Image (cartoon, rainbow, N blue to C red):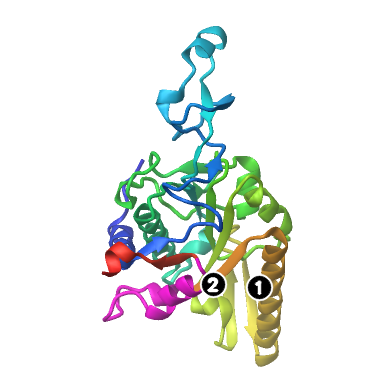
Amino acid sequence: MAELSRELRQAVRDGERAASRYALALPRGATVGGTRLGRASGSSLEFQEHRAYQPGDDLRHLDWSAYARSDRLIVKLYREEVQPHVDLLLDGSRSMDLAGSAKARAVVGLAAFLARAATHAGLSHVAWLANSGCRRLAPPGQPADQWRGVSFEGREALPVELARQAPRWRPGGIRIVLSDLLWDDAPRQLLGQLARGASAVWVVQVLAAVDADPTSAGFCRLVDTETGEARELLLDTASIERYRKAFEAHRASWRGACRGAGAELVAINADELSPESPAGWSHEALGELERRGLVTLSMRRAR
């Protein structure tokens, strides 16, 4: 698969540099190196159950006798001290690469930021791209500069991509979705799928300024980035105001659905994750992630 473009490699470097003082926050009740017991494969002697092998499982726990009998890879699960795993899902649809905006760069940089923050917290992670189904960008635990095939050419909305081929989520893991959420389908079904078997779900909405506030009035040509359909429209003050109200209603729908599913929603302005800023990434954007509890200052980095 193709390596990252020069622009996206720079976004990765920006994101990882911004993460130098942050760690991903753990779900309430989870520990790393603590005493809470979970259901993932571990190193204790208390056997739990068998299940099918999943990428990222500890190969030491493969049951070779079961493989010899069934020709299927089976792992033995033991009670263990919980070490949460992070699945990062990037929306690969065309709307994430909106012409004239920083959305694509911001999404990749933010994903790299969260992957590095997960590493600082002692957590394993895998990054996925939703584009013609969902596929891994690299083997588990690989740094973001090893991601391959990152593109934003998908013609389907994220729920359609997940229905076509969902990621192989790690049971009990933290799931973080990065998307603009700009599709018509109701969010509840998607959130239910994300929350099933997860210890925590975060939805990070990454928007360009024009997504939330199309201020230019006059005749314009609108192109659906997924389908390529074009329409000539007159944007007047009334139509812009109707768009703003519909946009706010859409966001309110997502906020309510996230509360109902036990998920957390945080919105990020893509322009605040711009390398053109003299100080790097915006303190407002990083501060919002911290205030909402997605990341925390890493003590070993902040000393």
Quarter holding residue 274? bottom left
Residue 140 place in picture, x, y as percent: 40, 40
Which of the image's four quarters has the C terminus? bottom left
Label 2: how many Cα within 10 Å (few below 14, some 14–19, many 20+): some
**Residue type for callout 2:** Ala
Most distant residue in the top direction: 69
Residue 95 place in picture, x, y as percent: 53, 63
* Disc sitting over residue 267 in the figure: 2
Is 151 included in the stretch rendered in magenta?
no
- In the image, the segment drawn in magenta is 270-293
* Disc sitting over residue 66 in the figure: none
Quarter holding residue 109? bottom left
Residue 299 in view (yes/no)? yes
Most distant residue in the bottom direction: 237
Q: Helix, strand, or loop for circle 2? A: strand
Residue 117 place in picture, x, y as percent: 38, 59
Is 276 included in the stretch rendered in magenta?
yes
Residue on which the image places disc 1:
251
Task: Measure the C-alpha gap from mark 2 to mark 1.
Answer: 10 Å
Residue 166 place in picture, x, y as percent: 59, 42
* Residue at image coords 72%, 69%: 256
Quarter holding residue 51? top right
**Residue type for callout 1:** Arg
Q: Is residue 57 left or right of residue 245?
A: left
* Residue at image coords 28%, 65%: 301
Relative to 11, does residue 119 appear above or below in the rendering? above
Using the image as rendered, state which of residue 297 and residue 97 is in the foreground.
Answer: 297
